[in-house]
Image (cartoon, rainbow, N blue to C red):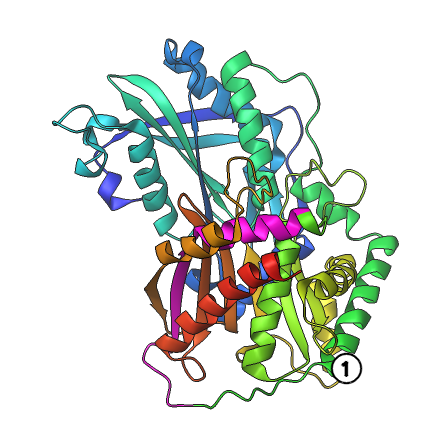
Amino acid sequence: MVTELSTVGRRTVSFVAPDPARTAPITWGQRALWMALRRHGTSRAMFALKRHVAVPRRARSDPERVYAAIAALMVRHTALRTRLELAGDEPRQLVADRGELPVLVVPAESGGNSGDAAGGGPVDPVAVAQRVADELAAEPFAHADDWPQRVAVVTRDGVPHQVVVVFSHTTVDFRSAELVLRDLRLLLARGRIDNAPGLQSADVADLEQRESHRRRSARAAAYWVEVTRRLSRDTRMPQREPATPRFRRGVLTSAAADTATRMLAVRHRTTTSTVLLAAAALVVGECSGNDLVGMHTMVNNRMLDGYPEAIAKLNQLALVPVDLSGDRRMAYLLPRVWRAALDGYRHAYYDPQALSDAFGAAGLPYATGVNPHCYLNDIRLSADSDLFGRDIDEAAVRGATTGTTFRLAERIERFTWRTRIEIVDRPDGLGLALTADTTYFSTDDIERFLRALEAHLIDGAFAE
């Protein structure tokens, strides 16, 4: 599976579930990835969610309890024993009723120097777990043959300390991954879970065949077509000969932006995600010269009955048109953005094939070339607005910008978006990452874009 870990131990966890094997269509969320897979190939269309959990002390004394918990997790959630048959025109989910899950056993002593304690002490199991997660995620999943997760147990002196789980995004989203890990922690601590699991991926797929869901999808498609017709694909930014590779990513880390974002959210009684969406739209509007800008963002789609606890890939893209033609101060912009975002979120659950068909009927391009609009992807595990312990004095917040850092990161040959902003967790501030098309953005432009985003957040926090 992973060559660098080929010398570590392996366990095979067997499971037998009480429910029978079955098949189901793929979900709408899975179909979006399947369509991307056909356009871009496995390495560009799929990615993994990397997680690890600490083994509680009571389970460390009994290593078999850890492997029993992993087996019980597989029995509890049919989504974890679902393979995808993606070949052909009608992809299917194949749910197994029994099987074997290979589990890597990685001694912390083999974790390398990166996790060593000062003075050559024992290796930190958490550092080893992070490295193992990276390596397990490096190889694309073979969806027809692999289970949608890879598991490893990190030990120290033979005692389990961390369980690593790397999920394929084909079957779970961020919320699902956290729900599965919650259940894993309970199984490790208690050995059982008394309540029934939530809806699983195959259950969601069956629901999406209902007429009520198809009507919802049709309304979403009509909304997307209407909004797309209003949006301009033009930009006033000059074009240049692109770099090779064509796309470049830069990352700005700002403690000042973190505090300012929280201040705006608290003051205007909104979410930090809405604040960041508004500030990003301001910068996009300044770059493009357009008063109406299209902002894509990811929506978890868990508002329907039974969906909050579902283990499935439910998240899909929303399209939010942000009108910048009025007063652009945050006090006036945030309510407009919030209303537009709610409308976009309501129309973010749809069959992507139906959306493609609607665009074709309207004579509009769908998922072709590089999307000219901006994709804001907030992938923080916590979108906290708590200001406890933070100095919110204006001089202190503006002074904190001296600690803002910028670095250039990956170069990418093929990419879907002209601009994609990622909001990421950083221990020393808010992480703002921009991946941009060098046809329009030089590396200096990427830094200017992110610093303008930081400035709008700080100015907004103290403008009114």
On the picture, is 123 further left or further right than 43?
left
Q: Quadrant of the C terminus?
A: bottom right
Q: Residue furthest left?
A: 119
Q: Residue at x 30, y 23 (%)?
A: 155
Residue 407 on image: x %, y %:
33, 62
Q: Residue at x 46, y 50 (%)?
A: 396
Residue 32 on image: x %, y %:
62, 61
Residue 320 on image: x %, y %:
70, 67
Evaluate whether residue 242 shows in this view: yes
Q: Nearer the viewer, residue 49 or 338?
A: 338
Q: Is residue 260 above or below residue 38?
A: above
Q: Residue at x 35, y 20 (%)?
A: 160
On the picture, is 145 further left or further right than 332?
left
Evaluate whether residue 271 shows in this view: no
Residue 430 on image: x %, y %:
47, 51
Tell me the SS state at disc 1: helix
Q: Residues within 10 Å of mark 1 (few under 14, many from 20)?
A: few
On the picture, is 422 further left or further right than 5?
right
The answer to if 264 sits in the magenta stretch is yes
Q: Residue at x 68, y 71 (%)?
A: 328
Judging by the rendered image, the residue that carries numbered circle 1 is 361
The answer to if 84 sits in the magenta stretch is no
Q: Is residue 292 above or below residue 29?
A: below
Q: Is residue 439 above or below residue 462?
A: below
Q: Quadrant of the N terminus?
A: top left
Q: Nearer the viewer, residue 78 or 96?
A: 78
Identify residue type, mark 1. Answer: Ala
**Magenta extent:** 240-266
